[in-house]
Image (spheres, rainbow, N blue to C red):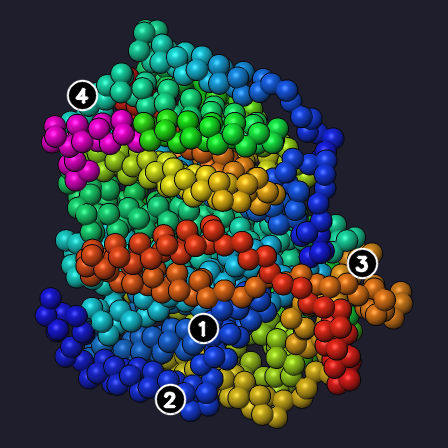
Amino acid sequence: MKWSEFFVTGEPLIYAADVAIVLTIIGIVFVLTYFKKWKWLWDEWLTTVDHKKIGIMYIICAVLMLFRGGVDALLMRAQLTVPNMKFLDAQHYNEIFTTHGTIMILFMAMPFLIGLMNIVVPLQIGARDVAFPYLNALSFWLFFFGALLFNISFVIGGSPDAGWTAYFPLASNEFSPGVGNNYYAVALQISGIGTLMTGINFLVTILKMRAPGMTLMRMPMFTWTVLITSVLIIFAFPVFTVALALMTFDRLFGTQFFSMANGGMSMLWANLFWIWGHPEVYIVILPSFGIFSEIVSTFARKRLFGYKAMVGSIVGIAFLSFIVWVHHFFTMGAGPAVNSFFSITTMAIAIPTGVKVFNWLFTLRKGKIRLTTAMLWSLAFIPNFVIGGVTGVMLAMAAADYQYHNSYFLIAHFHYVLIAGTVFACFAGIHYWYPKMFGHLLNEHLGKWAFWLFMIGFNICFFPMYFLGLMGMTRRMYTYAAGLGWTPLNVVATIGAVLMGIGFIVFCYNIYYSARYGERDMTGDPWDGRTLEWATASPPAHYNFPVVPEVTDLDAYWAMKKNGSGYEVKEEQLEPIHMPSNSGRPFLISIAFFFAGFGLVFKWFTLAIIAAIFIILGLILRSFDDDDGYYISVDEIKRTERLARKGA
Amino acid sequence: MGANHHHETFPWKHIVGFIFSLLLTFAALWVALSSGLSTGAIIGIIVILAVIQASLQLFMFMHMTESDSGKIQTINMAYSFFIAVVVVVGSIWTMSFVL
Amino acid sequence: MAEAAHRYDETMPLEYRTQESRLNILGFWIFLGAEVALFATLFATYLVLFQRTGSGPTAKELFEVKDVLIETLLLLTSSFTCGLAVFEMRRNRLSGLLTWLLVTLLLGAGFITFEIREFIHYVHEGATMQTSAFLSSFFVLVGTHGAHVSLGIGWMILIIIQILQRGLTPRTARKVFIVSLYWHFLDVVWIFIFTLVYLTGMVI
């Protein structure tokens, strides 16, 4: 293989990226060495099995990926502002929309939500950690190295360029030779394994590790949504695992699954992809609904309206989300019988979500509203998401979809549901739970500026796209002719995108500013919260709760505050607490996965096999490992609790 | 949990499970190769026989309903069966237009 | 709640006695649910593609009843003997446990041997996984099952070693129970391979 095939050459921007990457790596190594922080990094972060730290690492990665995905978006908008721009050629445009979509869904939304799940759920159910802490660490590092593998493609070997949906026959070797789409198949496979483990972990955690008295119908709504999301993950991700494996076999080993000869069926890829792909969008929206439920009820100072109906809706979604997938390819030709069935199920799935919207509205009604930044994001979600949702019902009508499919109408729809749904929830959730994570609040003034810039920018960017779609502008086109009447709305959309970018920068500045000057959270309960995570210190002790709380009602902590003096711990109640040991193996096994993946991408099978042997070695060592964790002594608990209370 | 498990003296469950699995296997073989039924009927019957044998093994061999989590384990397997049917039947039906 | 991780309940079988074990066993059942989804996708792919043989051989031309029957009986019997191993474990009979685990292993190895021979036979006849969509999906479906069985054999060997080193403890008992769940599950999957791949292929 030539160097020019291994490294991406001929592009000034890529060379600039190469330089930036090398400088960043040197910078990080220098800082760690100068401040003598290597041991700290290994002990506190690379080997941790603590769900709170794992959650923070997920969110850091997600914010970095939001940056990269956002830059991709701005590049696309720059290219499309006016007709016949020569900023990006077709090949580059294809690579950029592919990485934009893949990164935003799989490496931004998923880790952001999984990060919040990790930090919050064990605290909300009164547990000390998840059911499988070691597996949790492995989940994170597999995600990290899968994402890393995907992210280096644009400088080493070449980006995938067949869209985030990677349809065949375009994604086959015949039409996409080179390693780009190998990166897609392999990197997503590695990350996907991590996600599947997360699903299993949280399902068992929520079902078996709730504090005494917390029945299923007394769980916080965020925990409920995470429970159902875990079910979706467990049953949907294996479908993607198989689809990616079949893609890998076709591209690397010459099988005929999706080929155009010898019996292959290209369209089968779309079918398998979307059997996973539709539950996947529910995987990113249900936790978002949970986040909004928590925030709306906290800042309306009112119990969530219609708890039972909310639970019923999300359970309904657990079934329905698996029987709507064909709506992603009504135009593929399955015929009226198939299309009608899936049209009906798709319209039906709007109903439970509608129920939830009404419940949020009724929660707000006659509540004592506090307009914090988290609440602003949540309030904005409601109308914006509804716009996305109703256009979804328009798309659900199969016959009409023949007009809308893969036009900018579709792009507007899914960005309205994904951004107003998931991204708003990520911003809302991080503002809400930030004090719990780091012990200080994010600045409200900066938070509100970021909110208004981003939210208004979002509407300016994407609302015109509905009309562009109706005017005939198609998805994934790298430029368009003048004289079609599309230019004014494209200009408007680009302005909106720039505003979103500025909003994101303000958000990042807020993180820095608050780290230096942010208001400290001294009580652990800055919002007068309703759920158990607010009963812990900010940030919580390593073991979360010194004594496992007893739950008597829904909104467990609110009940404790109303009926008594909150969560009180008498020192006589303390017992030694058992904690799992840290381990470096999840990090090391994931590095092996990275090299195995890299080997597969470039068809360097020797490397792949050697790395696979290390993976198996890691599993064998795990099997023989009888480390049983350690105990935190009562004395240490007393000291930790007294220190925390001193600050209050 | 102690209540729904009693220490057996002889592995009855396993022997019964094994014998019935063998019978169901040979029955399916006979239906497929020697019964002379129509193709559709054969496929229908052997699929049913397979589901029966699978359920048998879940109960007899795998102790699915045992333990505090027996209900969860059963619901899990039932839901996974629902998913399997949706994925298999859904794919065959959706892709049937490809001649 | 975490303290309960080391609380023993003497009325339960050994493998359920610690909270950690109970969580692990439940976690493994959930994982089996995910495996059902995985194999369902492979079956869906196979059933959509199995009649698309291109210029290659059809299922009817390739499959032979004798081989399939031998493989089925080997695997089914190994699932039975695996059950006997857990039965012996629950009666605290270490030698019985080890004997039946070893028998299970050998039957499993026999299954894999016959399956590899079957695959090699097809390849010699010019029926490789690159030949047609039918053969791609056949080799990947049945091969994935075979890979799972092979991994199970390796896993069982590791556990046998641990039992020899450490005896029967709540932890080793749990490991035996979980690998037995895995092993039984693979036989359940085989029932569907037998039915939907081999019998169907010989009929349609």
Answer yes or no: is residue A378 visible.
Answer: yes
Name the quarter where the N terminus of chain A is drawn. bottom left
Q: CA distance from mark 3 to mark 1?
A: 35 Å
Whole-percent x, y for residue A84 in the image = 21, 77
Label 3 near label 2: C-beta < 8 Å?
Answer: no
Q: Mark 1: few, some, or many residues within 10 Å (few <14, many ≥20)?
A: some
Q: CA distance from mark 1 to mark 4?
A: 53 Å
The verdict on residue C123 being magenta is yes
Front of the two marks 1 and 2: 2
Q: Earlier in the sequence, mark 3 or mark 1?
A: 1
| Residue designated by label 3 | A550
Residue at 23% across / 38% down in the picture? C136
Mark 1 falls on what kind of element?
helix
- Residue at mark 4: chain: C
Mark 4 falls on what kind of element?
helix
Relative to A260, does residue C185 appear above or below in the rendering? Answer: above
Discs 1, 4: same chain: no
What amino acid is found at the position of numbered circle 4 in the picture? Answer: Glu
Q: CA distance from mark 1 to mark 2?
A: 21 Å
| Residue designated by label 1 | A61
Q: Is residue B1 left or right of residue A148?
A: right
Q: Mark 4: few, some, or many residues within 10 Å (few <14, many ≥20)?
A: few
- Which range is magenta? C112-131
| Residue designated by label 4 | C61
Label 1 near label 3: C-beta < 8 Å?
Answer: no
Residue projecting furthest to the right: A564
Discs 2, 4: same chain: no
Q: CA distance from mark 4 to mark 3?
A: 67 Å
Q: Nearest the camera: A18 or A539? A: A539
- Residue at mark 3: chain: A
Q: Nearest the camera: C1 or A323? A: C1
